[in-house]
Amino acid sequence: MSERYSLVIRGGTVIDGSGSAPRQADVAIAGDKIARVGQVAGSGVEEIDARGLLVTPGFIDPHTHLDFQVTWSERTTPCSWNGVTTVVIGNCGVGFAPCRPQDRDTLIGLMAGVEDIPAKVMSSGLPWNWESFPDFMDALAARSYDADIVTQIPHSALRVSVMGERGVNRETASAGDLAAMRRLVTESVRAGAIGVSSSRSRGHVAADGRPAPTFDCAEPELTAIARGLTDAGAGWLQIIPDFADLESEFAMLRRVVHASGRPMALSVMQLVNKPDQWRRVMDLVAEANAAGDPMLSQVIPRATGILLGFEMSQNPFFLRPSYRQIAHLPLDQRVQALRDPALRARLLSEQIPVNPDDAEDLGLRVAKWDRLFPLTEPVDYEPRAEDSVAGRAARAGLPPDEVALDILLQQDGRAVLYRPFSNYGYGDLDVVREMITAPHTVIGLGDAGAHLGGITDASSVTFLLTHWTRDRKRGQGGLLPVEWAVRRLTHDTATVLGLHDRGLLAPGYKADINVIDYPALRIRRPEVLHDLPDGGTRVVQRTDGYVTTIVSGMPVYRNGLETGALPGRLVRGRQPQPAGQPMPA
């Protein structure tokens, strides 16, 4: 009698996550595990015809900021719209646990300032049914999701929990503070956290304008936290560096790694004012690894940038007095007002001073016409200079702000301009290709649950597949193999995180799987949803081409539509490799 499986995926082109060449095969699933990859003689309770389609492991996103969303929603969108079946929260040192009741507003204000999530939305949605970090994990463990959830301990929350207002004011931690933080890290990792995240970025400020509590914390504090991981025998440090003094700060971070023996991942991107510094960072990371100090660069496979429009939190005119007079109006009324010839003329006559020597100058960020590009379908994340507002204006013989206004009034005021910021210093993505193909890197920084008013980079997961393996026509180096891209999104990330039970299509591994119509795979233009607590809005992008996304053996999405299944759960700590399975080279 032939075997009976819960699900069989028939005849697809299997890209198994190991980096091996694609091959045609069936995939049989029994319960939440893969039972067989190859020719499957048995039948499935359900079968999926995957002929002409790719079959891959589910993708893993290590940098999502979905901390708020997973406390009240079962959906990890927009990650799960991009084939992601495991998400990591607690990034950049910000989050909501541990948290004493008196510190709740502090952590909300910090998340609001650093990650652009409105405070009133968080105040309405957060259930606060926890205090310690293990309590927080228990609260998540009681819920069901469309993807698995993995947690990190946010350093700012930890510091405030231990030090109170002294921590908020960035006072130096005492010996007692350090001992408490070390103990709480150990306790949290033993309860299932995969590590600690921290931010040293001067750009990370709370809603009240104060820097993040961890901004300039001293080396002994980072070392104490790292040794908390050592005591637990597991976990990594995820750091947002500042690198105002690159050599000195990197040397300090490396000493922390050396003292603890725990790996560290640094967010790395090309900065506008230091366009080649990222290469030095990667060289230093390579030197550290060669000497036995495990360090990684976390990189994103496209430029990071803000979206500007009348539905977004910013647009090229939002600082001008005439626009500010109508900014409170509903979108349709604002559009009607902006089409009035008198208001239009007055608005276009107003100019906002900018400082060309300051890359962070807000006026320059939102109205640098040679770096503003219409974002239409098909979405182009590697636009040419002639496609910019300035380029279009020059061809039309018009002022660039007039061209920008006309673009934004299209689609009833829902049109979008894209302002690439980091990773686009030379007007193309050649530096990104170098980053994502470099050793000691992990793909991340999608920020799916953050920057809700003007950034939506969760689709960079799909972009790695579409742009880098199929669509790119510019730059150096040619296209990359699709099996390479799949490995980067699956096995490589799983290995870094210690999630050795997933990321490969092989018997015994977790049945997290994508069935993909590769030629049809695409990223849609941004849209605004009003689906957050208290009527809050967020900018998202949907995708086409994910035929089926499977979590723990259960289809959760079919052609972008929810099936109703919610098999995703909290994942506690490192997960063992299935017995008898060799690790890919």
Image: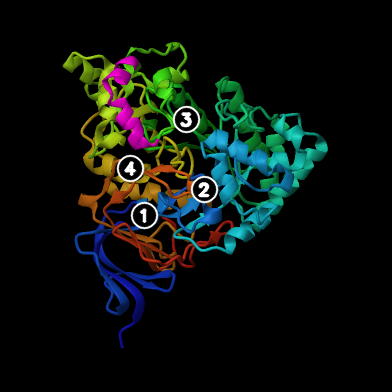
Cα gap from disc 2 to disc 1, whole angstroms: 41 Å
Q: Picture coordinates of residue 234 (x, y %)?
A: 62, 51
Report the disc number at residue 464.
Answer: 4
Cα gap from disc 4 to disc 1, whole angstroms: 14 Å
Q: Nearer the viewer, residue 190 or 380?
A: 380
Q: Main secondary structure of the magenta part?
A: helix
Label 2 or label 3, whichever lies nearer to me, is 2
Label 1 secondary element: loop
Residue 186 visible in the snapshot: yes
Q: Picture coordinates of residue 97 (x, y %)?
A: 65, 48
The three-letter code of the residue at mark 2 reads Asp
The three-letter code of the residue at mark 3 reads Met
The residue at which mark 2 appears reads as: 534
**Residue drawn 31% across and 88% down?**
1
Counting residues from the N terminus, which is met first, the one under dot 4 or under dot 1?
1
Counting residues from the N terminus, which is met first, the one under dot 4 or under dot 2?
4
For the magenta stretch, what is the residue range?
330-346
Residue 292 visible in the snapshot: no
Report the disc number at residue 282.
Answer: 3
Label 2 or label 1, whichever lies nearer to me, is 2
Eyeballing the image, is 176 above or below 495?
above
Counting residues from the N terminus, which is met first, the one under dot 3 or under dot 1?
1
